[in-house]
Structure formats: structure tokens, C-alpha cells
Image (tube, helix red, strand yellow):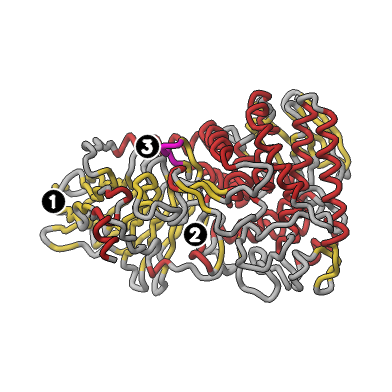
């Protein structure tokens, strides 16, 4: 301890990410919120408590706002703000500087306001409407897109007949962090700044001020924050995303869920000293990259979403992993601390396969030959290491999986083998496009070996269902038995679907991780939905999709996909929202790039849907619209410039751009 004191190497105690009143219980079927245009609205109810939390991110900060009210309607809020590029000791995964701000409150005529909640509104910005007698307050809260702060626009309206004298109480002021907690003894300034300390409001008039919750280097000059400018930038981001990958279905709840998913999927990107990094968030995961969340889940989406920042981030992500890639050893799990460190604590999780899977899908979707040249060697090395792990049963061995031994994964698990199969197949498409035909054939043959191994080793009757065992050590059903369906292996589609929809795995709004458990991870539900639509189980899938979308968008914890329950207080990790969007592109429409200017379409619409479409998709280097209409047993499709493409239900067609 003395040595630590002398050298400043004292680990700072963690602080809570969520307020105690915002602990999220397991979701129920009740609707707590309602849609009002593009807004999600909650109106305060008498004699009922309410608690929630939502994360919003910008390039230099991310905020988790816990908000709610007690049974008497009294307003509650906690502002947890994370500053990813302000590093603490030890400089590891969880060492972003963060702070819980108490915020600005008000007194009128010397008496502190006791605010009651009228309404909560979320539109990508959290709007909170409160009141105390004839004083009405509207807070518009958002993380600044391009500054290290949480911004709060506060508008107070005087509903009385008298002039009000208002005092603004700054409950935070300025805090300087101790040297002993800082990486390289750095100190940071954490402060709340309010644009005005006091003012008067005439009867019937309103007054607007700004509060900024900031974190900077101690010697940083004034930030010169402009709240209106940052608000405009936030609104412009949301408006821009509204024009990209526009999912249209007959269901407004699903359409709205897609709209919000784009916000969370795209906002959690940070400017670091090693370039743009998409990170999960959730209070503990910032300025860092993972082979599952980023390489596998979100980056393939950025290959066709059309969001330039997301695309640039993906290129940077795959590039940063290059120096850790080898055909002779497993790829590391995570690059952390702005690129200054790594994490590989669960050993080989199939990370090389995850990289090869995601990078190959990203490159194919981009249609960019130069990008393919840039990453071919890295994908090849990951593919070759993966092939080296094929065991005597012709499946891919790994130490764990992406759940990192929270649940049994044995010595060879279904997820790693399925991801590996798809990665090798996608890589063969890239090699074909580059004219390397014999190599392409080699990787296709290896993919087929793994596919045969999946059939021979994993196919089994588990708890009465003709499906897959997750690993030889696992005797119960797992939600990850959906993985073959997501990569086009439908040999046991019926039995697998029956198992996923059974009372052993199905809960109200999703899937439990293992039969007999209460734990769920949204990612397996989202993968399952993609796979179930792909294999033709559209009607049963729609019922699950409806239940899931309603629970997340309008239930007790809105408006995004979450990580897990009970772990992590259902944190709204960013890449899960990307997985939600991929249900529609790769599941319902069955989009699969197979070259730099060609892709497969295999629509799978529920019988109650007459149409679905995705507009403004950037695929194979071109912005396209894909529209599908039902006509008896056929689909009639149009793909930007190609009209009246007719295909039978359950079949696929190849589109060249």
C-alpha cells in the first residue's frame, strides 16, 4: 500500500452507474408508455412509482440518466456521465473517468421548488416536464455530440399572476480528481456550469437556461459550450439517421423500434487517440473494441447502413486488430483504453472466427475492392487459425464463447463452429472476386467440412426436440441453438424452431439463455429472430418480434435492446440495437452479399404482412431501395431500377447492381 501511495497507483473505487430507484425488474407484458408521433411518452400516474434509465452518447461523453418519481409524484433524477478519453488507474477496460452529478435545482422567492412529474418524453432526447404549483419546468437532456459534457436545456414558465424571482442552485460546482486515481497522475476537472445563477420571469413568460455537466483535463481552457449548437447537432444526427435504412412494415411499433435502434446503434462511437471506436456503453465499456460486439455484431451493419461515421469506425476497428492477428494463435478478445491495452481474460472465445465473419461480411457489403485488398490478409490469417482449431469431430474447438463461461461452453461449442462456417464461406466469395479461384475452393471445402461436423456432432434430441446440443457437456436446451439458422443451415429448422418457441426457452418477450433459467441475454433473442425468419418461420417469428418490440419500446424499460437480466440492470448496450436492425435486412429480406456488386435476396414475410421494404440502404457501393409485396404464393420485388422481380415464397434470387 505504501508503494502504491508513493507512486500514485491507487485504484479508484467504482461508483454506481444507475440510481437505486432505477433498478429494472424483469419485463412484463404491460404497456407503460405510448407512441405520440416520433416520441415515446409516459404520463405520471397517481400512487404509482416509476423508475427508468436511458443512455445517450456523443464523441467525448456518454450519459446514463436515471429518472422517475415516487408514489407522490416527486421528481427523481441521477446523471451518470462517462468521459471515455479521461483515463484512470489502472488503465484497463473499466477505467474511463465518470461522475454522478446532482444537478441544478431552483428556488423561487427563496423557497426551494418541490417538483412533481407531469410527463417523460423520449425522442432521442430525454424531455422531462415537472411543476410546482404555478411554476412549470421543461428539461431537454442529451449528451453533447461534440463536447465532453451532458447538456440540459431548462425552460421555466411562470403560470402565476406574479413576477417570479428565481435562484438557480448548482449542487455540484467543481471537483478536481486526486492524482493518485489518475493514469500517469493526471488530474481532471469535473464540473457543473449553469448559464445563469438567477433571473426573474414575468407572469405568463418563460426563461431558458443551460446546465452543462463536464469533464476535462485540469489545464484545459474553457470549453465555450454552446447548448443551442449542441442541441442542433443532436437533432441533425437523429434527422440524418431517419433517412438511412428506413424500415417500413405494416406495424408502427416495429417501425418505431427500428428508428430508435438506429440511434443507439450509431451514437456510441468515440473519438480516441487511436481513431473512432464504437463501444458497448452500459457504464463500463468505452473507448474499446470487442470481437463480438463490434467485429461481429455492429460492423457488418455499418457496411450497408450508409452512416459514414459508422463505416469509418468499422474500418478503423478492423485495422486496429490487425497487429494482434496471427494464423498461429487465437485473436485477443478486446482492445481497450483507447488502444493502450488489451483484454483476453476468457482465452480463445472463437475471436478469430468472429473477426473473419464480421470483416468478410463488411467488405462484401461495402462493394469496395480496395477495402478488400486492405483486409484480405487479416481475414485469411483469422480463417487459417480457425481451420487449425478444427478437431477430430470436424467442429471448431475454443476455450469459451462470447458469454465468457457464464454458461457451459465446453471444448467445442455450436456458436463458434457456425460463425466459423459462415466466415470461411464469405471469405471464399471475396477470393472469387479477386480471381483467386483455387484458394476460394479451398476455403469453401473447409466450410463444408465444418458444416458436416455441425450435423454429425451437434445434432441431437435435447429435452424432446430434434435440434442441436450447444456442446457435449450441456444437457439442456440453449437459446444459441438458433445459430445454424442465422448462417443458412436449415437441416433441423423445424425442431430448432419448436424448441425456441417452447415453454422451456420462450419467455414473454424473448428467450432465456438456458432452459430452467431466468437469465436472458437479448443478443440470443435477436440472433434467433433473424434465423427464424430466414428459415421460413415467419408467422411464429412475428409473434415473438411483436412481443419483443412492444416490451422494449413501450414496456417498463424503453426504448432500446438491452444486454441481460439480471446481470447489468438491463444496460442498453449499443451493438444489440444493431442486431435488432439485422433482423430486417438479413432475416426478413434475406440479404446476403456474395460479391462486390451482387447479393442474394430471400424474403420471408409473415402471412399477415402484405409488404415490407427498406429504403436508402447503401449496398455494394450504391444507395438502393428494396420493396417486397406479397402476391399469393409469390413475392413481387423491386430493387432500385429493377422492377417486378417475381420469386416464389421460400426461394432466393440473385441481384446484380
Residue tagged 3: 146
At horizontal 15% and vertical 48% (from top left) the residue drawn is 197
Real-space CA distance between mark 1 and mark 3, rounded to the nearest whole angstrom:
37 Å
Give the class, few, some or many, for how many residues have Cα within 10 Å of label 1's Cα (few <14, many ≥20): some
Left-right relation of 287 to 629:
left
Q: Position of residue 595 (x, y in %)?
A: 76, 30
Earlier residue among tags 2 and 1: 1
At horizontal 72% and vertical 63% (from top left) the residue drawn is 411
Q: Position of residue 441 (x, y in %)?
A: 85, 35
Q: Nearer the viewer, residue 138 or 103?
A: 103
Give the class, few, some or many, for how many residues have Cα within 10 Å of label 2's Cα (few <14, many ≥20): many
Left-right relation of 590 to 229:
right
Residue tagged 2: 571
Real-space CA distance between mark 3 and mark 2, rounded to the nearest whole angstrom:
23 Å
Give the class, few, some or many, for how many residues have Cα within 10 Å of label 3's Cα (few <14, many ≥20): some
Earlier residue among tags 3 and 2: 3
Bounds of the magenta segment: 270-274
For residue 163, the mark is 1
Tell me if residue 303 can be seen. Answer: yes
Q: Nearer the viewer, residue 34 or 126?
A: 126
Amino acid at each position: 500500500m505504501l508503494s502504491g501511495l508513493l507512486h500514485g497507483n491507487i485504484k479508484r473505487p467504482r461508483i454506481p452507474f444507475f440510481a437505486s430507484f432505477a433498478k429494472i425488474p424483469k419485463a412484463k407484458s404491460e404497456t407503460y408508455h405510448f407512441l405520440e408521433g416520433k416520441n415515446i411518452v409516459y404520463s405520471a400516474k397517481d400512487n404509482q412509482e416509476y423508475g427508468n434509465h436511458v443512455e445517450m452518447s456523443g464523441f467525448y461523453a456518454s450519459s446514463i440518466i436515471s429518472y422517475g418519481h415516487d408514489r407522490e409524484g416527486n421528481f427523481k433524477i441521477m446523471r451518470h456521465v462517462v468521459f471515455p478519453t479521461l483515463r484512470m488507474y489502472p488503465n484497463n477496460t473499466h477505467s474511463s473517468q465518470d461522475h454522478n452529478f446532482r444537478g441544478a435545482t431552483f428556488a423561487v422567492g427563496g423557497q426551494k421548488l418541490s417538483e412533481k412529474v407531469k410527463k417523460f418524453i423520449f425522442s432521442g432526447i430525454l424531455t422531462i416536464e415537472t411543476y410546482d404549483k404555478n411554476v412549470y419546468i421543461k428539461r431537454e437532456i442529451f449528451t453533447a455530440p461534440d463536447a465532453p459534457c451532458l447538456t440540459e436545456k431548462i425552460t421555466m414558465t411562470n403560470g402565476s399572476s406574479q413576477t417570479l424571482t428565481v435562484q438557480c442552485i448548482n449542487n455540484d460546482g467543481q471537483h478536481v480528481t486526486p492524482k493518485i486515481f489518475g493514469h500517469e497522475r493526471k488530474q481532471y476537472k469535473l464540473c457543473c456550469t449553469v448559464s445563469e445563477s438567477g433571473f426573474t420571469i414575468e407572469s405568463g413568460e418563460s426563461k431558458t437556461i443551460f446546465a452543462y455537466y463536464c469533464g476535462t483535463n485540469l489545464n484545459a481552457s474553457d470549453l465555450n459550450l454552446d447548448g443551442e449548437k449542441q442541441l442542433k447537432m443532436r437533432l441533425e444526427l437523429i434527422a440524418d439517421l431517419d433517412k438511412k435504412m428506413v424500415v417500413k412494415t405494416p406495424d408502427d411499433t416495429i417501425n418505431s423500434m427500428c428508428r430508435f435502434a438506429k440511434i443507439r446503434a450509431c451514437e456510441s462511437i468515440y473519438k480516441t487517440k487511436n481513431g473512432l471506436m464504437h463501444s458497448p456503453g452500459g457504464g463500463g465499456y468505452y473507448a474499446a473494441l470487442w470481437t463480438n460486439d463490434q467485429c461481429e455484431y455492429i460492423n457488418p451493419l455499418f457496411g450497408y447502413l450508409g452512416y459514414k461515421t459508422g463505416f469509418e469506425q468499422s474500418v478503423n476497428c478492423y485495422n486496429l486488430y490487425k497487429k494482434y492477428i496471427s494464423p498461429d494463435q487465437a485473436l485477443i478478445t478486446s482492445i481497450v483504453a483507447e488502444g493502450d491495452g488489451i483484454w483476453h481474460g476468457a482465452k480463445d472465445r472463437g475471436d478469430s472466427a468472429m473477426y473473419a465473419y464480421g470483416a468478410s461480411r463488411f467488405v462484401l457489403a461495402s462493394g469496395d475492392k480496395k477495402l478488400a485488398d486492405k483486409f484480405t490478409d487479416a481475414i485469411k490469417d483469422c480463417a487459417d487459425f480457425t481451420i487449425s482449431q478444427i478437431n477430430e469431430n470436424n467442429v471448431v474447438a475454443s476455450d469459451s464463447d462470447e458469454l465468457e463461461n457464464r454458461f457451459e461452453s465446453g471444448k467445442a461449442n455450436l456458436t463458434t463452429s457456425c460463425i466459423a462456417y459462415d466466415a470461411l464461406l464469405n471469405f471464399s466469395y471475396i477470393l472469387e472476386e479477386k480471381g483467386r479461384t483455387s484458394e476460394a475452393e479451398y476455403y469453401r471445402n473447409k466450410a463444408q467440412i465444418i458444416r458436416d461436423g455441425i450435423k454429425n456432432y451437434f445434432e441431437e434430441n435435447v429435452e424432446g426436440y430434434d435440434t442441436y446440443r450447444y456442446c457435449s457437456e450441456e444437457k439442456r436446451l440453449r437459446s444459441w441453438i438458433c445459430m445454424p439458422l442465422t448462417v443458412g443451415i436449415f437441416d433441423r429448422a423445424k425442431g430448432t424452431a419448436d424448441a425456441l418457441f417452447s415453454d422451456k426457452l420462450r419467455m414473454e418477450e424473448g428467450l432465456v439463455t438456458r432452459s430452467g433459467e431466468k437469465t436472458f441475454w437479448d443478443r440470443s433473442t435477436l440472433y434467433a429472430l433473424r434465423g427464424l425468419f430466414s428459415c421460413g418461420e415467419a408467422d411464429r417469428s412475428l409473434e415473438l418480434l411483436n412481443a419483443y418490440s412492444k416490451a422494449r419500446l413501450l414496456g417498463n424499460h424503453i426504448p432500446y435492446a438491452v444486454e441481460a437480466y439480471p446481470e447489468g440492470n438491463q444496460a442498453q448496450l449499443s451493438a444489440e440495437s444493431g442486431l435488432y436492425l439485422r433482423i430486417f435486412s438479413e432475416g426478413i429480406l434475406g440479404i446476403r452479399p456474395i460479391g462486390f456488386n451482387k447479393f442474394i435476396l430471400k424474403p420471408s414475410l409473415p402471412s399477415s404482412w402484405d409488404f415490407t421494404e427498406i429504403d436508402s440502404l447503401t449496398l455494394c457501393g450504391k444507395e438502393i431501395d428494396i420493396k417486397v409485396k406479397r402476391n399469393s404464393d409469390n413475392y413481387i420485388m423491386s430493387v432500385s431500377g429493377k422492377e417486378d422481380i417475381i420469386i416464389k415464397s421460400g426461394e432466393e434470387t440473385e441481384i446484380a447492381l
